[in-house]
Image (spheres, rainbow, N blue to C red):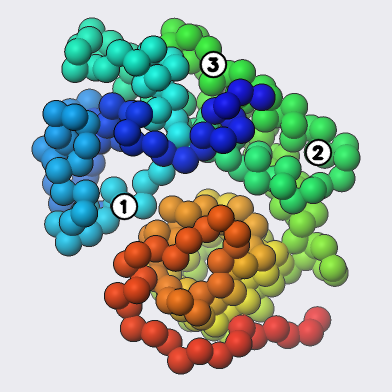
């Protein structure tokens, strides 16, 4: 396994060329303070590819930037695929570089999920399939720009997602039956404080502004769940599955929110009011 697959699955902006600030389009909204066409640099991008308002992004109307993670795709495109040549010094590479970034980012996201899946110690046969998918995904990410641009990312993602879903289902059922199936459910703004979500399938669920205060999410599969503005104060996510840091960055929480290892309490949580602490509800089944 290459270094990228093993240990570079988080953004390292110092080794990138501001690709997330140039390649995608922004639509003026509560996440972005301006419209920006794809391929055009954000007005806040500095000549050294740093962000001119990085410390003030939320206050200046760019919370969407604070929750974006390329899973390390940016530095891989910059340093490996294009050999350290930046799009300003070599403008002829710009369009191709931006298009490759759009392919590399989902590949690196899959690498992250596959790594997390293997850490759950699935049965040997499934672990072998996951390891093979990890190796194949990383191999695809090493291809040339021309080859990457011909890749059917959706087809590859579909195959990998089937493995990840199987892994999540097995992990959710450990210690008893799996929890409720809310896969893809529209739970926007819902008060879920009395819901039993232990072992629940919340893959792709819309939990925007949902009230999850003090909820026990042990073994809940949170793959791709939209947690923007979800209230996680006092919630127990320490045993949740496939929870990414960017999901936490988009949510609300406090020092009583319990997180998995290698996840951190976002800095902006410290500015939110504390909820009266109560132990997470643990119902018997």
Q: Is residue 124 above or below residue 64?
A: above
> Which residue is at a point 27% across and 31% down the rendered structure image?
18
User: Tag 2's secondary structure?
Assistant: helix
Q: Residues within 10 Å of mark 1 (few under 14, many from 20)?
A: some
Q: CA distance from mark 1 to mark 3?
A: 28 Å
Quarter of the figure that contains the N terminus? top right
Q: Which residue is mark 2?
A: 127
Earlier along the polypeptide chain: callout 1 or callout 3?
Answer: 1
Q: Which residue is mark 3?
A: 142
- Which x, y percent locates residue 194? 59, 85
Q: Foreground: 104 or 6?
A: 6
User: Tag 1's secondary structure?
Assistant: helix
Q: Residues within 10 Å of mark 3 (few under 14, many from 20)?
A: some
Q: Which residue is mark 1?
A: 66
- Which x, y percent locates residue 265? 44, 65
Q: Is residue 279 above or below residue 7?
A: below
- Which x, y percent locates residue 152? 54, 21
> Which residue is at a point 51% across and 34% down the rendered structure image?
8
Tell me if residue 109 can be seen: yes
Q: Is residue 256 above or below residue 65?
A: below
Earlier along the polypeptide chain: callout 3 or callout 2?
Answer: 2
């Amino acid at each position: 396994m290459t270094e990228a697959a093993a240990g570079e699955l988080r953004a390292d902006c110092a080794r990138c060329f501001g690709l997330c600030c140039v390649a995608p389009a922004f639509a003026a909204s509560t996440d972005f303070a301006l419209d920006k066409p794809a391929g055009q640099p954000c007005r806040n991008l500095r000549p050294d590819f740093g962000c001119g308002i990085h410390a003030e992004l939320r206050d200046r109307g760019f919370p969407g930037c604070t929750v974006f993670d390329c899973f390390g795709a940016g530095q891989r495109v910059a340093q490996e695929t294009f050999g350290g040549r930046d799009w300003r010094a070599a403008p002829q590479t710009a369009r191709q570089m931006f298009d490759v970034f759009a392919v590399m980012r989902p590949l690196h996201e899959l690498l992250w999920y596959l790594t997390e899946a293997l850490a759950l110690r699935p049965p040997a046969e499934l672990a072998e399939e996951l390891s093979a998918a990890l190796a194949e995904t990383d191999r695809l990410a090493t291809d040339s720009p021309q080859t990457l641009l011909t890749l059917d990312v959706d087809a590859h993602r579909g195959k990998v997602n089937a493995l990840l879903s199987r892994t999540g289902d097995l992990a959710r059922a450990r210690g008893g039956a799996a929890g409720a199936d809310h896969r893809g459910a529209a739970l926007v703004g819902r008060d879920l404080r009395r819901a039993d979500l232990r072992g629940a399938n919340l893959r792709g669920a819309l939990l925007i502004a949902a009230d999850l205060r003090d909820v026990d999410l042990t073994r809940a599969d949170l793959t791709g769940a939209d947690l923007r503005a979800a209230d996680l104060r006092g919630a127990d996510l320490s045993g949740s599955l496939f929870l990414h840091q960017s999901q936490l960055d988009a949510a609300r929480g406090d020092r009583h929110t319990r997180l998995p290892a290698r996840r951190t309490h976002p800095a902006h949580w410290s500015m939110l009011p504390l909820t009266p602490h109560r132990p997470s509800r643990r119902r018997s089944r």
